[in-house]
Image: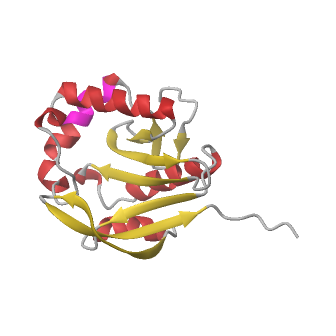
Amino acid sequence: MEEDPYALSTRKVYLRQLSERDASRMLEIRTSNKSYFKPWDPPLPDRYFTLEGQIEMIQELRHARSQGSAVGFGVFLQNSHTLVGRVALRNIQRGAAQTCTIGYFIDQNYANQGYTTDAAGLLVRFAFDELKLHRVEAAIMPKNAASIRVVEKLRFRREGLARWLLFIDNAWRDHYIYAITKPREISD
């Protein structure tokens, strides 16, 4: 495992910043899972499904991290160091809000094995402990049962339904809004 000053891990997975050398594997994940991800993905340009497009995505995440607006990590298996997905915090807001949104995807060959829950849990901890954020939100379509299971296992609470929130799979879609806030320390 390459050294990352923000390395995070569980028994099953570890997270690290993606580098250009990860672009070919990320391209493989995105192209082989295109139909699997289609019901959940926003419109993506054809270029996204090229090696150059994946290199650009990695560079954009790195730039967004340097600007403080987003942070993303590859999800790697502990036992084989295989890249199996990505998790990201986006829309990082400072000031009074101290909030962000979380997103994630995992190769369908590795779904339903707890990897996404582990990776998302590590990222929530990173948001609270390293970025010192107060709140992490997730917007999930009601029919995305697997993603709902992930956030519910992490103790996110459902706060409501946002009507026609995001343009996904060629239509404006409703999304449940889930959130978790940093546990407050009680000092009496």
x, y percentage for residue 116? 39, 55
x, y percentage for residue 36? 16, 55
Left or right position of 146 against 49: right
Residue beneath the point at 21% across and 58% down: 167
User: How many tags in the picture?
Assistant: 0
Q: Nearer the viewer, residue 124 or 134?
A: 134
x, y percentage for residue 99? 53, 54
Task: Establish if 17 lies above or below 14.
Answer: above
Task: Establish if 144 lies above or below 133.
Answer: below
Residue 24 sits inside the magenta stretch: yes
Magenta range is: 21-27
Left or right position of 111 against 30: right
The quadrant the C terminus occupies is: bottom right
Quick one: which residue is furthest to the front in this view?
96
Residue beneath the point at 21% across and 34% down: 27
Q: Nearer the viewer, residue 148 or 62?
A: 62
Task: Establish if 23 lies above or below 76.
Answer: above
Q: How is the image coloured?
A: secondary structure
Left or right position of 31 against 106: left
Residue beneath the point at 32% across and 23% down: 21
Q: Main secondary structure of the magenta part?
A: helix
Quick one: which residue is furthest to the right in this view?
188
Residue beneath the point at 22% across and 67% down: 173
Q: Nearer the viewer, residue 134 or 83?
A: 134
Q: Nearer the viewer, residue 56 or 67?
A: 67
Task: Establish if 120 lies above or below 65.
Answer: below
Residue 30 sits inside the magenta stretch: no
x, y percentage for residue 125? 58, 52
